[in-house]
Amino acid sequence: EVQLVESGGGLVKPGGSLRLSCAASGFTFTSYTMNWVRQAPGKGLEWVSSISSATTYKPSADYADSVKGRFTISRDNANNLLYLQMNSLRADDTAVYYCARRDTLGWFYFDYWGHGTLVTVSS
Amino acid sequence: EIVLTQSPGTLSLSPGERATLSCRASQSVSSSYLAWYQQKPGQAPRLLLYGASSRATGISDRFSGSGSGTDYTLSVSRLEPEDSAVYYCQQYGYSAMYIFGQGTKLEVK
């Protein structure tokens, strides 16, 4: 059974940092592009970042404009972990952050999601 | 940048009726990269359809999708109260970006 379990959320002051983790199990983690998607309270979904599978020669990362330069996505393939390092946090980064797996067949959809971890940026 | 606009914002229907949800793109998008998700309160989104019309594993055939170019539709037939949720369309576009519509809230009661 595919499982994605996020952790690391919490309350942080504006300008602070936080690192989110996502523990993956039930599938070959190295074969999948992994993503972070967030949802501000009462709002819709916003894609945050993506990191390509470990099967590519040099894994590449992409970011939404809203987080570029502040957030860094990475993966630990030996331990099936996905990370999101968030720096210079702002109030509008407050959201539930979901870890999501992207399909491998090039359809570019998210087929499995974790339950999310809440990040609150407030003084 | 492509924008996905979903309508209506809220749809209220009775059990047994058919729901039609719209997702309109600001410019033509590939139907191959159009997906639909269902999200119930307090839960993570769940993939319903991909490639505009292909059902994900385990999804009821009451859910169907269609469309091309800029206009896409999610239809839900024989509505049940458990179909009450927010539905999002999503598209993968240029610049390696994933874009979501703002969502349509479906109420079945």
Image (cartoon, rainbow, N blue to C red):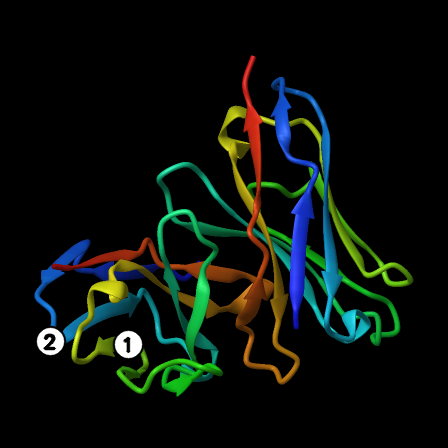
Answer with left or right where residue B28 lies relative to residue B84.
right
**Are callouts 2 and 1 both on one chain?**
yes
**Image coordinates for residue A119, horizontal then vertical, percent:** 58, 33
Q: Which residue is drawn at 74% across and 55% down?
A: A23
Output the chain of dot 1.
B
Q: Name the residue under label 2.
A: B16
Name which quarter of the figure residue B38 lies in: bottom left
Checking the image for residue A113, the label placed there is none
The residue that label 1 is drawn on is: B72
**Percent position of residue A45, x then y:** 44, 51
Quadrant of image for the C terminus of chain B:
bottom left
Q: Report the residue at 54% width, 33% height from top.
A: A93
Residue B42 picture location, percent across and down: 42, 47
The local crowd at label 1, few if under 14, some if 14 to 19, many if 20 or more residues have their Cα within 10 Å, is many
- The crowd level at tag 2 (other Cα within 10 Å; few <14, some 14-19, many 20+) is few
In the rendered view, tell whether residue B39 sits above or below residue A18. below
Tell me the distance, in whole angstroms, between the alpha carbons under discs 2 and 1.
Answer: 23 Å
The amino acid type of the residue labelled 2 equals Gly
Q: Is mark 1 on a helix, strand or loop?
A: strand
Looking at the rendered structure, the secondary structure element under dot 2 is: loop
- Name, please, the residue furthest toward the right: A78
Residue A82 lies in quadrant: bottom right
